[in-house]
């Protein structure tokens, strides 16, 4: 089965950029969207032309901000919005769907913001999110994917030196947060299968960054160690446009 993740940077904008055709060409069984920037009913309206998929969504209290959604061919056993901590659950950042063999967790991790204003909050958010994932894992394996808003290693960012500890997404606090996920038993599928490959999933809209491939790998598919052997491929699709992020995904057999 194929699982795709894409930060679309506004669902109502991306559907005007041949989204349906791109969606169909990817032929995914599960399609996770981040940064929908819309309320649940607006997400449903924007995706009304997508047939034969179950839609789940989690929107921020603040309109036009953040938000996650999952399209799945299979009806989920259960759906949970957020991680169960009120202070974290106002921004529509986490959407968990349960299926027979796994939990599928779609996440749009907190951006530390310009001037690193939210870095302290991000540090706590990462810790609480990891605890949430480990609690799910007590029941069944977890596939967690989305925009993690961090470049974990130097290979994941085109210009590491000028950004380290200065830019949101490449501070030691955020790097350590991702390290904690991996040390807790989650596998970064792309880096595990492509240890030396330079590949990015986000590019600034400024200065022709995408054309020059001055990018950041911010989007990940992590899986519980217990199911990593079932992962057949993990990929990044930089040629698919429509957002400042490109889709990422895995093929996994159960």
Image: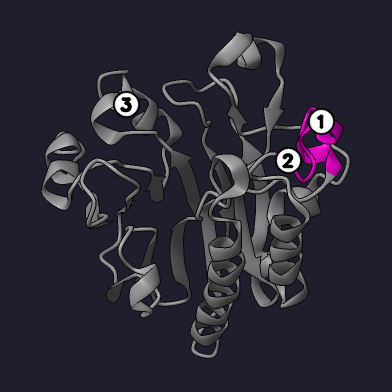
Mark 1 vs 3, N-terminal side: 3
Query: Can you give x and y, in whole percent of width and height, for residue 179 in the image?
Result: 76, 65
**Secondary structure at numbered mark 3:** helix
Residue found 28% across the figure and 76% down from its top: 78
Q: Indicate which disc residue 162 carries.
A: 1
Q: Is residue 127 above or below residue 208?
A: below
Report the mark closest to the observer, 1 or 3: 1
Q: Is residue 250 above or below residue 142?
A: above
User: What residue would you read off at disc 2?
Assistant: 166
- The one nearer the camera, 207 or 25, is 207
Indicate the quadrant where residue 14 lies. top left
Query: Can you give x and y, in whole percent of width and height, for residue 165 in the image?
Result: 77, 46
Circles 2 and 1 in contact, beta carbons < 8 Å: yes
Residue found 58% across the figure and 52% down from its top: 148
Q: Is residue 186 above or below residue 24?
A: below
User: Which span of residues is magenta-colored?
Assistant: 154-166
Cα distance, mark 2 to mark 1? 8 Å
Q: Residues within 10 Å of mark 1 (few under 14, many from 20)?
A: few
Query: Can you give x and y, in whole percent of width and height, for residue 164 in the image?
Result: 80, 41
**Secondary structure at numbered mark 2:** loop
User: What residue would you read off at disc 3?
Assistant: 14
Query: Can you give x and y, in whole percent of width and height, for residue 190 in the image?
Result: 71, 48
210 is within the stretch colored magenta:
no
| Direction from residue 147 to residue 178 in the image, left or right | right
């Amino acid at each position: 089965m194929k699982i795709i993740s894409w930060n679309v940077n506004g669902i109502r904008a991306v559907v005007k950029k041949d989204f349906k055709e791109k969606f169909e060409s990817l032929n995914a069984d599960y399609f996770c969207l981040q940064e929908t920037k819309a309320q649940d009913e607006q997400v449903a309206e924007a995706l009304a032309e997508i047939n034969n998929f179950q839609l789940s969504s989690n929107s921020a209290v603040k309109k036009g901000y953040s938000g996650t959604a999952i399209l799945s061919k299979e009806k989920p056993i259960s759906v949970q919005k957020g991680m169960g901590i009120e202070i974290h659950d106002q921004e529509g950042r986490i959407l968990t769907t349960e299926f027979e063999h796994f939990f599928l967790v779609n996440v749009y991790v907190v951006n530390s913001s310009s001037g690193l204003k939210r870095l302290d909050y991000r540090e706590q958010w990462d810790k609480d999110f990891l605890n949430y994932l480990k609690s799910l894992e007590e029941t069944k394996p977890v596939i967690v994917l989305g925009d993690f808003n961090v470049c974990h290693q130097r290979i994941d960012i085109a210009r590491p030196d000028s950004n380290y500890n200065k830019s949101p997404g490449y501070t030691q606090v955020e790097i350590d947060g991702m390290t904690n996920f991996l040390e807790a038993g989650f596998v970064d599928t792309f880096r595990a299968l492509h240890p030396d490959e330079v590949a990015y999933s986000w590019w600034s809209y400024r200065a022709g960054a995408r054309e020059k491939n001055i990018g950041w790998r911010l989007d990940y598919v992590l899986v519980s160690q217990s199911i990593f052997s079932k992962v057949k491929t993990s990929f990044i699709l930089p040629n698919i446009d429509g957002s400042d992020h490109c889709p990422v995904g895995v093929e996994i057999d159960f």
